[in-house]
Image (spheres, rainbow, N blue to C red):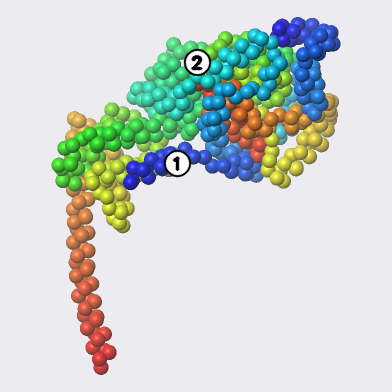
Amino acid sequence: MAMALRLIKRNLGFNLLPLSSSASLLHSHATSFGFKEVQEEEKSQMVSNVFSSVASNYDLMNDLMSVGLHRLWKDRLVSKLSPFPGMKHLDVAGGTGDIAFRILETVNSIRSRALQDPCYDPLQEETEIYVCDINPNMLNVGRKRAIERGLGKDKSLIWVEGNAEALTFQDNSMDGYTIAFGIRNVTHIEKVLDEAHRVLKRGGRFLCLELSHVEVPVFKEWYDYYSFSIIPALGELVAGDRESYQYLVESIRRFPNQEKFASMIADAGFRKVEYENLVGGVVAIHSGLKL
Amino acid sequence: MYRTIARRLLSGSTLNGSDYTLRGFRGTVTAGSRFTTSTIPQPLSDQNPKQHVEGVNPQPNSSASSSNQSTAEEALRRERQRPRTEYQEEQASVLRASLRHVLSLGWGEEAMIAGARDVGVSPSIVGSFPRKDAALVEFFMDECLQKFIDRIDSEEELQNLVPSKRISKLVRIRLEMQAPYISKWPQALSIQAHPSNAPTSFKQRAMLVDEIWHATGDEGADIDWYVKRTVLGGIYSTTEIYMLTDSSADFRDTWAFLDNRVKDAFDLKKTIQEAKYLAEAVGAGMGSSLQGFVRRVFRE
């Protein structure tokens, strides 16, 4: 029912929003949107607005805010995943295709090496990388970039519009699941984790790259100053949108810390839950294994 | 005694460091290797299993939900309660299946992917193996050691052999275990020699050599302990390398080579023993003449 509602909402856009939220207000819970308390029904729409408004400048702003480091973080995520030819992978909230392109490149380089090997079995299954994003604007950015990279015709990339809390994929159908800088923006983290656990095969891995909590003393002070003073100003200057970037830094602070998030992953049924801090915890890569 | 130490060492190799925050932070300063915390993950689920075992664990956010949702959660909870195969077992079964593919695919990731497909687990699991490049070789070494220990315990004729024969027999038993993989063994050696894997492979070899001395009936703990192990380690490794290029039937040349090396070592031991006696005799003679000299000096 919730999903149907969301579908309708997505199709009709803004107009239905006041109606639907007032109808379900009775059973609604408060959730956080940055530091603000909002109704659960509103959060996804508000997040959607944020990403619609930043989609065009998304890459530029990522580069500016992370001084280009986000590329290394994404490389690290993919190298931890260690993709293989014939893999069925689901990249959630990956509208711009950053992770998907990296996985595809890794698989292709393994494949071209394997082709020189006489024992290589050409009957292997085709690699399929599903890019799932709730926001069509972000998916369009990704599609455009795929064409720029000459991957427009690649059958391995499949663009899917969908909600991470209610995936449309079969149970036990995926080898890998990644979510990079996405889980912070969902309304129910637990639902997303349960869905990830559902779609993964036995032995499949869940990997999450997310901005996290810095605990290193002096660096923490500097990082707080940087996030609350510089990033919103930067957003205003470059993307002309202070609000969205204010939301960004606030939502990072509201996100559970490394240990807490790891235990949430374990509660969803994942085994061998680990995390790795990058740059002192500015981002963390959490991983879990379905058995 | 050595076995317990060895086991402790083995389990110690899976321990993890804890200063991850600091490491991660250092990443920013040294713009070297990708700004990461090197390879020290924080194992969580395996360290506090009570988190999962207690299936009754109330879920914090499930109070207000429709009935069909609660049945779904019920099912999920039941699934969590179900006794699950431990991660280590799963890893071992994948690696065991991978050994069948070593001859065609080598000791690397490809064999492990093929092995995972064989046991019906998603090949993704390979990415979760700690130090996955060496995982297969190290697993094989551990398996061989275990088989070796079992074999020693069951083999009775060993006790009737003289020490030198016993040692060469033991080394031969162990080396024969890797004979099926001989065409791919150079790759295994190069993986083991890689700096990041060297500590583990050194430990595994030390344990093996220890086990051989143990089986030979050597219980000494004097200074010879190191000498004995160094010498045997040398014999084992040179024979292992000789074996790589041996094309004789059933590695006949290798075993002859091995017997000679062991004989050399025992001869050397004898020579050292003789040299020691000689030195003692000379020392004693010198000492007494020096003593006599001193006594004479003081008497006058």
Amino acid at circle 1: Gly
**Residue at 18% across, 61% down:** B274
Rendered location of residue A279, percent (x, y): 65, 38
Residue contact between numbered discs 1 and 2, judged by CB atoms under 8 Å: no
Q: Residue at x 57, y 14 (%)?
A: B75
Residue A192 seen from this side: yes
Q: Nearer the viewer, residue B154 or B93?
A: B154
Q: Is residue B188 visible?
A: no
Q: Quadrant of residue A269?
A: top right
Output the chain of dot 2: A
Q: Relative to residue A129, is residue B249 drawn left or right?
A: left
Pointer 1: residues within 10 angstroms few (<14), some, or many (20+)? few
Count up the numbered dots.
Answer: 2
Q: Residue A257 at what x, y percent from top left?
A: 67, 33
Query: From the viewer's perspective, is residue B61 above or below residue A253?
Result: above
Identify the residue at image location x=40%, y=17%.
B118
| Residue type beneath disc 2 | Gly
Q: Is residue B275 above or below residue A43?
A: below
Residue that mark 2 sits on: A86
Residue at 21% in and 73% down:
B284
Neighbourhood count class around disc 2 (C-alpha, 10 Å): few under 14, some 14–19, many 20 upward: some
| In the foreground, B277 or A147 | B277
Residue closer to the observer: B107 or A109: B107
User: Which image quarter is the C terminus of chain B in?
Assistant: bottom left
B132 left or right of B67? Answer: left
Q: Nearer the viewer, mark 1 or mark 2?
A: 1
Which residue carries the number 1 mark?
B12
Q: Kindly state the secondary structure of the residue where label 1 is placed.
A: helix
Q: Residue furthest front?
A: B56
Instruction: Measuring from the top left, give residue B41's x and y in whole percent.
Output: 55, 35
